[in-house]
């Protein structure tokens, strides 16, 4: 009878989510038992082993088995344990819908009401096992053995079937041949999944979540009843949610809280709710939007599902240049602005990006063009509609003015601003400055000279003396009315850049168009007279009209002057005076009609005193020296005007060397002195004489200077007898 002894054990495998008491038990210390060590008789003792469906039915009809199942279920915390035990055994007593062979025993192996013969593998564990030690001990209370593990040498065969009771599914495992019973309760299992339709969203776009609540219990398990889904939807940055419309379902959003009620969810059944934010999404809502949805049911543990949708806002940057740039008169002025969405890759785009700038107009600066084509200029107002800029995308805007007028050569500071949806903005400033040109004229020579009969010339340097980098002097012109005294005539004017022309009387009107002169640069104009100037032009040639002009009202002038170097000026003297001297008598003279013979020299001879009027003329050549000095040489002829035989008539040739000092100015009064040689026709009476004279100007002709000259001489060889040896006269001296 020992081989028919049955170890009465009833075991339950309950889903962790179905009963809190079961979950608490599963966290206790794990203890394993070997079924071969369990002994004692059962309350449903069989006369034969459990080998087929008939013997299983006989076992089910035993009242003791029902009591044992009820007691174990009650100990597991099930309130309606008696009814459940009755339902389970009722399936066994009533027969099975089908019978078949299966593989390994598992909860999913059998269908509802189906009997399957399967194998329980070595090492498999049953969470709940009920048994009673033995009748001989007199203890009829079943003991609950937790976590039974089969440790036999080989798998054992078992019956497996499913029974439904009170909204739960129970899987029953009965090993052969001993008839131990294991019961696994399969309750409804709620699960919630929440998924963002897009992990990332952008400002203005909708935020959407799909929320699914389902009964995750295996098919045939109990139905979850009175299921409720709630979700406190995120509202960061003013995010709002649109009403939910689900056919046949009771869902609503109150404020930002979603509430859905489902009557029941059968095993594997699910419901999906989609929530979408109102449009458009506020820019401030561009942040992390996360929350958790939860579901509850009357007969299942609650469940939660969490989802996150992220928005990274755009970041506008504006860079304007140049920061400290320069520009020049006559050239366009340009600013460059770069607008960039500096957010990290994958971030939101900046939308409806608009760049605005009130451009500077100091000094009449006018703006002409702007690129790209989305930009327009109205007066001084720039506006660029740049549209949408993706993260890390940049657009460069360039504005260019018309050529800057002279008055605009001042500081031109400026500040631009860029705006986009969401109130994001950025601004930056830049500045341009301009240094005006400085015009200067340098005329050479100033106080120079030219040779009588030679060529006169001026060299004029027109300069822009502003520092390097300053604006050029534009539309530079040079004009002058050149001096023409004495018929001075000008011949040519050449410029190192630009063109020059001479016109008018004696080609004295100078007009030069020199174009532009860069800062620190100069244009040289050379003006020359005819190769040979008229003699009358050998005089002072002042020039006070040399003037340069340029755009912007710039002007500069530098007078120059020329004087003529009369290196050897010719002049003529005409004079009348008295000649008194003691003269020797030679054989060529007569006295009272008689020939006179005398010996000349120390041996004796006859002298006589000559006193006669005389007139004469000189031709001279003068050399001008510094400080109004003059050195001159003359050659002339003096003629006696006597006719009486009692006087000697002598005609004499003279050579003079003299030095003259003009007292106030060249051409004015002068005094002078010198040495003269007389009577060069008669070598025996050649007499050196000293002379002094004074000149007084008559008139102010610049060409033919006229002086009255008074002169006195004395004979050096008769210096001791001055009373009888002298000459004097007065006359006119004219230069030509």
Image (tube, rainbow, N blue to C red):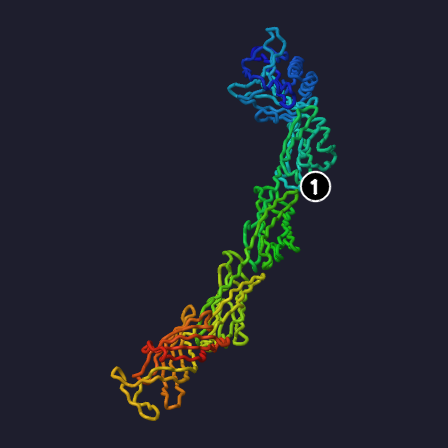
Residue 531 percent location from the top left of the image: 45, 76
Of all residues shown, which one is farthest toward the left?
A: 603
- Out of 273 and 610, give the one closest to the viewer: 610
* Residue position marked by numbered label 1 in the rendering: 279
- Say if 600 sits above or below 443 in the image: below
Residue 30 percent location from the top left of the image: 56, 17
Residue 159 percent location from the top left of the image: 61, 21
Residue 62 in view, yes or no: no
- Say if 308 sits above or below 67 in the image: below
User: At 57% across and 58% down in the image, what residue appears?
Assistant: 332
- Out of 222 and 680, give the one closest to the viewer: 680
Circle 1 sits in a helix, a strand or a loop, which is it?
Answer: loop
- Out of 152 and 56, give the one closest to the viewer: 152
Within the image, what quadrant is residue 615 found in? bottom left
Of all residues shown, which one is farthest toward the bottom?
A: 593
Quarter that holds the N terminus: top right
Tally the marks.
1
- Say if 268 sits above or below 501 in the image: above
- Out of 638 and 128, give the one closest to the viewer: 638
Residue 595 lies left or right of residue 639; in this view the side is left
Residue 341 percent location from the top left of the image: 59, 45
Within the image, what quadrant is residue 626 found in? bottom left
Residue 608 in view, yes or no: yes
Quarter that holds the C terminus: bottom left
């Amino acid at each position: 009878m020992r081989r028919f002894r049955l170890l009465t054990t009833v075991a339950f495998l309950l889903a962790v989510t179905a009963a809190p008491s079961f979950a608490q038990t599963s966290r206790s210390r794990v203890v394993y038992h070997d079924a071969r060590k369990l002994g004692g008789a059962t309350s449903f003792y069989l006369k034969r082993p459990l080998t087929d469906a008939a013997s299983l039915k006989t076992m089910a009809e035993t009242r003791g088995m029902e009591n044992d199942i009820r007691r174990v279920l009650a100990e597991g915390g099930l309130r309606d344990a008696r009814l459940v035990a009755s339902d389970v055994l009722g399936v066994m007593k009533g027969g099975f819908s089908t019978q078949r062979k299966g593989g390994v025993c598992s909860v999913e192996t059998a269908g509802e009401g189906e009997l399957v013969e399967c194998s329980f593998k070595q090492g498999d564990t049953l969470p709940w096992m009920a048994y009673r030690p033995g009748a001989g001990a007199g203890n009829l209370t079943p003991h609950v053995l937790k976590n039974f593990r089969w440790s036999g040498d080989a798998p054992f065969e078992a019956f497996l079937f499913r029974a439904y009771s009170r909204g739960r599914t129970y899987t029953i495992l009965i090993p052969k041949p001993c008839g131990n019973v294991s019961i696994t309760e399969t309750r409804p299992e709620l699960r919630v999944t929440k998924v963002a339709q897009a992990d990332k969203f952008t400002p203005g776009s909708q935020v959407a979540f799909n929320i699914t609540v389902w009964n995750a219990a295996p098919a045939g398990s109990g139905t979850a009843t009175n299921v409720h889904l709630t979700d406190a939807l995120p509202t960061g940055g003013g995010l709002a949610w649109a009403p939910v419309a689900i056919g046949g379902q009771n869902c609503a959003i109150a404020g930002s809280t979603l509430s859905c009620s489902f009557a029941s969810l059968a095993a594997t059944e699910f419901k999906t709710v989609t929530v979408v934010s109102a449009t458009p999404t506020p820019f401030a809502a561009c942040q992390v939007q996360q929350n958790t949805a939860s579901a509850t049911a009357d007969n299942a543990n609650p469940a939660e599902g969490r989802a996150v949708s992220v928005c990274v806002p755009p970041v506008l940057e504006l860079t304007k240049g140049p920061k400290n740039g320069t520009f020049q008169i006559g050239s366009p002025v340009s600013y460059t602005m770069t607008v960039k969405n500096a957010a990290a890759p994958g971030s939101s785009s900046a939308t409806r990006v608009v760049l605005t700038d009130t451009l500077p107009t100091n000094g009449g600066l006018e703006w002409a063009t702007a690129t790209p084509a989305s930009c327009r200029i109205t007066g001084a107002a720039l506006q660029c509609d740049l549209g949408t800029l993706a993260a890390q995308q940049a657009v460069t805007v360039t504005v260019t003015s018309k050529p800057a007028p002279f008055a605009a050569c001042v500081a031109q500071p400026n500040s631009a601003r860029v705006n986009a949806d969401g109130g994001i903005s950025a601004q930056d400033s830049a500045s341009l400055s301009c240094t005006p040109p400085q015009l200067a004229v340098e005329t050479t020579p100033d106080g120079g000279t030219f040779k009588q009969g030679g060529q006169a010339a001026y060299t004029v340097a027109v300069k822009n003396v502003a520092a390097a980098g300053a604006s050029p002097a534009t539309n530079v012109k040079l004009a002058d009315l050149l001096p023409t005294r004495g018929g001075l005539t000008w011949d040519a004017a050449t410029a190192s850049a630009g063109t020059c022309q001479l016109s008018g009387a004696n080609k004295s009107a100078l007009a030069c168009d020199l174009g532009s002169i860069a800062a620190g640069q100069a244009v040289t104009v050379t003006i020359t007279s005819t190769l040979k100037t008229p003699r009358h032009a050998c005089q002072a040639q002042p020039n006070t009209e040399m003037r340069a002009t340029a755009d912007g009202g710039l002007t500069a002038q530098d007078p120059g002057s020329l004087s003529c170097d009369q290196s050897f000026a010719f002049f003529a003297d005409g004079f009348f005076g008295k000649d008194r001297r003691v003269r020797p008598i030679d054989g060529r003279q007569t006295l009272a009609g008689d020939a006179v013979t005398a010996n000349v020299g120390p041996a004796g001879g006859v002298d006589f005193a000559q006193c006669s009027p005389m007139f004469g003329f000189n031709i001279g050549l003068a050399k001008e020296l510094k400080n109004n000095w003059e050195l001159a040489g003359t050659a002339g002829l003096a003629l006696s005007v006597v006719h009486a035989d009692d006087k000697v008539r002598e005609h004499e040739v003279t050579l003079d060397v003299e030095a003259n000092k003009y007292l106030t100015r060249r051409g004015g009064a002068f005094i002078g002195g010198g040495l003269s040689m007389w009577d060069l026709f008669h070598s025996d009476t050649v007499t050196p004489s000293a002379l002094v004279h004074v000149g007084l100007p008559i008139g102010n002709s610049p060409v033919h200077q006229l002086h009255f000259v008074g002169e006195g001489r004395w004979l050096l060889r008769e210096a001791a007898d001055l009373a009888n040896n002298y000459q004097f006269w007065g006359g006119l001296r004219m230069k030509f």
